[in-house]
Image (cartoon, coloured by chain):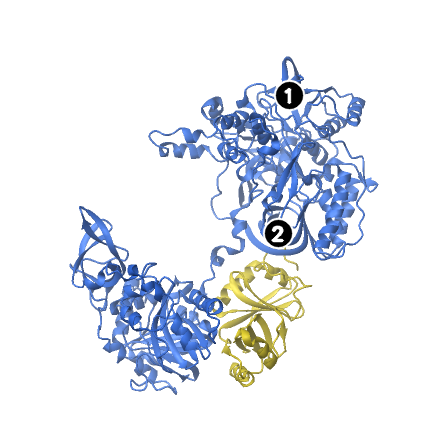
Chain colours: A yellow, B blue
Amino acid sequence: MADLRIHPLFGDHRALVRLRVSMSNVEAAARALDLPLEPLTTRGADPLAMWIAPDQWLLVSGTRSAAQLIADCEARLHGVLYNATDASDELACILIEGTAARALLAMGSGVDFDAARFLPGRCVRTRLAKVAVVVLAGVGERFELYVDRSVSHYLERWLERNANDPILPS
Amino acid sequence: MSVAQTNRLSTGGQIDRSRTVTFTCNGRRYDGYAGDTLASALLANRVGVIGRSFKFHRPRGILSAGIEEPNALFRVDIGKMSMPVVQATMQPLVDGLVATTENVWPSVDFDLGRLLDYTHGLWPAGFYNKTFKWPNWHCYEGFVRRLAGVGRLPEGADPTEYFQHNLHCDVLVIGGGPSGLTAALAAARSRARVVLMECEPRLGGSLLFEGGEIDGRPALEWLEHAVRDLECMSSVRILKNTTAAGYYDHNVLLAVDRSHANQTDRPVERLWIIRAKQVILATGAIEQPLVFTHNDRPGILLAGAVRRYLSQYAVTVGRAVVIATNNDDAYRTAFALHDAGIEVPAVVDARPEPSPEIDAQARSRGLEVISNAVPVDTAGRRGIQEVKIAQLSPDGRPDTRAMRTVACDAMAMSGGWSPTVHLYSQAGGCLRYDSARACFVPDRCRQAVRVIGRANGNFELAHAMEESAAAGRAAAHDAGFEPAPFVAPSVRGAPAWGIRPVRHVASGPSSRQWVDFRHDVTVADIELSVRENYVSVEHLKRYTTTGMAVDQGKTSNLNALMLLAGLTDRPVPEVGTTTFRPMYSPVSMGAISANMQREFYVPLRRLPAHRWHQTHGAEFDDYGGWQRPACYPRAGESREAAIAREVRAVRNAVGFFEASPLSKIEVRGPDAAAFLNRLYVNNALTLKPGRVRYGILLNESGIIIDDGVFVCMAPDHFLIYTTSAGAQRTAVWIDRWHQCEWPEFRVVISVVTTQWAVLTLTGPRARELLQSFDSDIDFSAEAFPHMCFRSGHFADVPARVQRVSFSGELSFEVNVPAKCAADLADSLMERGAACGIEPIGIESLDILRLEKGFFHVGIDTDGTTNALDVGFGNIVAKKQEDFIGRRSLMRPNDQRPDRRQIVGLEPVNLRDRLIAAAHLVRSDRGSWRSEGYITSACFSPTLGRSIGLGLLEGGFSRKGEIVTVFNEGRLFKARVVDPSFYDPEGGRMRG
């Protein structure tokens, strides 16, 4: 675990928006906002759209505010039944990077985080260490964990504790 | 001073003789070598009696060399680590290890518990169900429980760290013997992700001690190459010291990894949860004992184990070893012993003659083979000293007239091998009896599992290798990979495997013939079971305990089944087998709880302003999964005094309370109002934008499941608040109604609970405080009446504010983005100082709402309380539209006037205190019966007396009546009153 780093993005001022649309409007919304329709995938860079459920996406932007993202949804989702809500305060982001990152994630979740399957750009919403998280795979064994802020302290401690298993690759 | 290793051969074995390991067993120091197990080291040191049997406390020695060991159970202490009931055969020898036999008193050499053996006729199977009836079982329970069991839980903190991992693979191979290695190699060549699991520290299985040639080179050399090949493949993961203990549906398996368990500085145990597309079981087979009189004497071991100790550990179990067998395999033990210079006085074979090849080898060594004969008894004080042998007559019974006695100091017995099918059985696999091999073998299974090698009854290594190679390729193919060419290793000199299924010979007292060494079950116990008509194999198991618990019948099931078949005159297949259950071998509770211990047991949630509360002296408690301030006691102030002070602050000035856990659910869409109207008892269609309404939620039976307010932000945009404890449950429940029952409603539901912090200002000076901040929200009474909602900015942050009250005072719930909570709390406290602001905790809020008479769902209601029972009859009657639970409220039983209805209560004698959960009782024909109970109670700091809410039969019509309260054996009187004790007109909160 020598190169393993776990750290919360305290200074994370990125805007996060949850977008949920009516199931009958999913494809229309995806076309209008260039959202991924394939499960467990992402699209775009800023905003990055993460598929988290058949009718839900998480939008992340480092340059635009949540209000701007919501306004953008409003402007482009004419005729679409949807609700876009600011999640910037709701979710905290914990960064895990290093050779042992995948093994550490697998300690808390039944998702297959194998490097050949969970490629950079993939995302998954799962239960990790008993709490709901969205895991986003970045390049270079770097993973972002989006977790409810009320339990982020717990998850951070859990990751730190389990990173001590001597079997984790270094 | 340590004892010399008198039973260690001067050469051979795979131990590291350059590294002496010192250990202690039952107070005596011994030496062994690195590479030994505790069992091999004890045998090397000629330690015969290593424990006492479970029930009769008979002296016992080591029986086997593997996971099937029933006798050699120790408490093992290594450094600070202490583990009970450790099998010596599975415990690697480490420096400083201390092994202690636990179920003995005063010592393993002289155990007073042996009195039970001398009086064994009094303690047959199931004796505890037939005895100890007078005066009752509990008089004997303590004594019996002290005698029972084989170990004690260690005391003090457990130094072992536990971790849990999930692992996915395409092919999981369990068993690192020749078959498992071959299958793993074959599967891995196709680039499938392969996990190879082995319960021992080294891969190789029988190759480590059986010798032979594979692919034209010595078996150990082939093994070395095979292991190196596997280690070089990136798609292969090898887990050594890891035992698969449970096999569940969907090819999910559970395994315990003890590869770091014996580290003195930092012991670690690991639990693997493995999801495999394909599973290959190469779990081998377990040799079965023979059943004869006094077959449990120390010095009597399984023949394969004797061979293993000799070859792998250079340990002989004795200097004169008699072989007793019903098959060819045990002859290999005889040959190995003879070749090592150990005397083999006789080979007793139940068959008329061994295989010709075996016979020739025996003759060439000059071994005496006594054919068509069986051991019928043994003698010896602290271990076997002689064995009595009888010839079998043509009817298969021993001819005791022609008995022969052979002196020896050890015996190697073999009743044949039984495939290790425990995991296969756990997976749902069915077994069939193979009469040619005299054992149960795998038949069919609904899961994607293959069984190979000895575990499949394929005892010939050459055939097993071919079968394993094919299984590895097929498993990879079925997992979605193109199988790569792989040639099965060729094996030379595969031994013969002939067997005659004679495992028990009726001679001598059956109560002295052991079937299950672990549970001290004898042939007499099985006979008794049959006499009492427990002839189903499942009944036999439970009646006698054979094959139960951690042992899972590894060395007893087959013999018990065959005995049952014989005693009931049925063929073995008709008797069948019991169901093997997880765990295959014991798993520590620490490993099971692994990543979920201590602070990780439950993820307790924190409020947005958690640190603020900490710095302001909050005393935290767990409320509905949240860590929340119970109160804020000052230095030297009691909890009760702090709560009373906080209540007074709210009644006289202003209190600050963080209510962020309140669930917030946005419902948006043209049908939002209609959707809410269907959910709530209360009318949502008439709610105008900017207005707030209280509502209760019922289930289909009309029972109250949650409550809260809902806000109309816009005609197509509503915001629901539910209770904090019910937040997640209610959000899921609402979504389910939309998704599953009413998808026609054009709404989208979004949970925004933790995006918004809720800072509540409550008290007569709340408005004054809020008005001192910059805000585009007009907080005046005219502009912002009770039960209204406004949004805008407050103190430069976006805010959603509603005027609702749970305290009975003027209250504003200010919702701001969660990250702003702590800063805003600081500002509120700073400016509020002039208004007498106090932070208040949940305990004082509970008193405030009780004084006001507001009920709390789940506290003042239970699983029987419907909307009518809390006074919502008028609202239900007026509502024209349908809602969840409405139909149920129309049932006569739901409208009965004598149902338990919510009332206020106060003691008649002001010195009496109402207690929550105390019953309200009435005398009914000479006896007391409950007519309700107190749901909430407190001493009101505002009113200066005890008050409470309760559910009382016919409560609505009993205002003013005196009822009897029963609390902890004491009766006192209370008056039924209106629930609203404080400001019943509501002028203060509407002001």
B98 up-or-down from B841: above or below: above
- Between B35 and A86, which is closer to the camera in this rendering? A86
State which quadrant residue B299 falls in. Answer: top right
- Residue at 48 percent across and 48 percent down: it is B157
Q: Is residue B38 left or right of residue B824?
A: right
User: What is the x, y in percent for residue B700?
Assistant: 38, 63
User: What is the x, y in percent for residue A85?
Assistant: 49, 77
State which quadrant residue B940 falls in. Answer: bottom left
- Residue at 56 percent across and 84 percent down: it is A76
Chain of residue at mark 1 = B
Q: Which residue is mark 2?
A: B251
Does residue B271 appear in this view?
no
Q: Which is nearer the N-term, disc 2 or disc 1?
A: 2
- Between B717 and B360, which is closer to the camera in this rendering? B717
SS class, disc 1: strand
Q: Amino acid at mark 1?
A: Pro
Q: CA distance from mark 2 to mark 1?
A: 44 Å
Query: Dots 2 and 1: beta carbons under 8 Å?
Result: no
State which quadrant residue B277 falls in. Answer: bottom right
Chain of residue at mark 2 = B
Q: Is residue B799 left or right of residue A3?
A: left
Residues packed near mark 1 inside 10 Å, few (<14), some (14 to 19) or many (20 plus): many
Q: Which residue is mark 1?
A: B375
Q: Nearer the viewer, mark 2 or mark 1?
A: 2
Q: Amino acid at mark 2?
A: Asn
B693 up-or-down from B777: above or below: above
The mark tally for this picture is 2
- Between B876 and B67, which is closer to the camera in this rendering? B876
Disc assigned to residue A24:
none
User: What is the x, y in percent for residue B203?
Assistant: 70, 44
Q: Is residue B239 left or right of residue A18?
A: right
Residues packed near mark 2 inside 10 Å, few (<14), some (14 to 19) or many (20 plus): some
